[in-house]
Each structure stands twice: as structure tokens, then as C-alpha cells.
Image: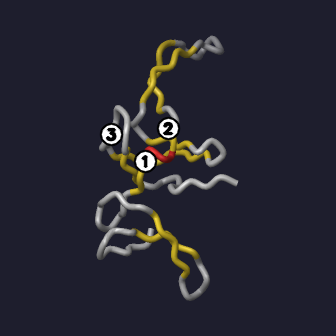
């Protein structure tokens, strides 16, 4: 089983590549491949062929998958990129925690 440190809906910052430093929301996660799709980032041009009479063909811009190791989660409280830690609450539920100094916010 492969694990990815971000979930769908998380805000992430890109660590390397053409979109380095930009932030976006995770649209999809593929743990098997270890990849994520981030909204509005890593955009690739795709040539689409019309499949029916109503559908139009042409060149479409679409977000491409990128390796999860190239993104880092952003803490909703402090707004800084952070590594994700895990903590168990008293009732036994597991939550993700910000590792930045003085923050410790659950998300």
C-alpha cells in the first residue's frame, strides 16, 4: 500500500518545476502512482479529437499529474508550508498536525 502525505482538498505549495512557489488546491490524489493533480498548476496542452458530432475538437489546457514529493501541504492557521505529523486524540481518532514552531494546528 502506498501512502501520500496530502489529501484531496488540501492547499499545497509547489516545491520544484516551472510552477515553483505557487499555491493551489489538490483536485485528485493517486496513491498507487504517488501523484497528485493541483488546480490551475502544471497545465499541459492536450490535443482532443471530437468523439461525436456535438463534441468539438481542438487544443485543450488540462492540469497534468505531478509527483506528490514535489508538493508540500500549507497549514490553514499559520499559512506556511509544513510537513505533516500525526497525533492521536483522547477518543482515539487520528488527526494531522502542523509541524511549524508554535503552531501545532490540526488539519
Q: Residue furthest bottom?
A: 90
User: Percent from the top left, x then y, of residue 79?
Assistant: 29, 61
**Direction from residue 74 to residue 27 in the image, left or right:** right
**Along the viewing direction, whichever of 7 and 56 lies nearer the viewer:** 7
> Which residue in the protein does label 2 denote?
66
**Height in image: 3 above or below 28?**
below
Q: Is disc 2 surrounded by few (<14), some (14 to 19) or many (20+) residues within 10 Å? A: many
> Which residue in the protein does label 3 denote?
20
> How far, Cα to Cα, is label 1 from label 3?
9 Å
The reply to whether dot 2 and dot 1 touch (C-beta < 8 Å) is yes
Question: Which badge, 1 or 3, is on the more N-terminal residue?
Answer: 3
Instruction: Indicate the quadrant containing the N terminus: top left, top right, bottom left or bottom right.
Output: bottom right
Write down the quadrant of residue 57 in the picture: top right
Write down the quadrant of residue 40 in the picture: top left
**Height in image: 25 above or below 86?**
above
**Direction from residue 52 to residue 44 in the image, left or right:** left
Assign a secondary structure to mark 3: loop
Residue 10 - label: none
> Which residue in the protein does label 1 denote?
71
Q: Is disc 1 surrounded by few (<14), some (14 to 19) or many (20+) residues within 10 Å? A: many
> How far, Cα to Cα, is label 2 from label 1?
9 Å
User: Percent from the top left, x then y, of residue 20?
Assistant: 33, 39
**Along the viewing direction, whichever of 41 and 35 lies nearer the viewer:** 35
Assign a secondary structure to mark 1: strand
Tell me the residue at 52%/36% (across/down): 65
Count all numbered tags in the image, as a single digit: 3
Tell me the residue at 45%/68% (across/down): 107
Question: Which badge, 2 or 1, is on the more N-terminal residue?
Answer: 2
Assign a secondary structure to mark 2: strand
**Along the viewing direction, whichever of 21 and 62 lies nearer the viewer:** 21
Q: Is disc 3 surrounded by few (<14), some (14 to 19) or many (20+) residues within 10 Å? A: some
Amino acid at each position: 500500500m502506498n501512502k501520500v502525505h496530502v489529501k484531496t482538498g488540501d492547499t499545497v505549495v509547489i516545491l520544484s518545476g516551472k510552477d515553483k512557489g505557487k499555491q493551489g488546491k489538490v483536485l485528485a490524489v493517486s496513491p498507487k502512482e504517488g501523484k497528485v493533480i493541483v488546480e490551475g498548476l502544471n497545465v499541459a496542452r492536450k490535443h482532443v479529437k471530437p468523439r461525436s458530432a456535438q463534441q468539438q475538437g481542438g487544443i485543450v489546457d488540462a492540469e497534468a499529474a505531478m509527483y506528490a514529493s514535489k508538493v508540500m501541504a500549507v497549514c490553514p492557521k499559520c499559512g506556511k508550508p509544513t510537513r505533516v505529523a500525526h497525533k492521536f486524540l483522547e477518543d482515539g481518532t487520528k488527526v494531522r498536525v502542523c509541524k511549524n514552531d508554535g503552531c501545532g494546528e490540526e488539519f
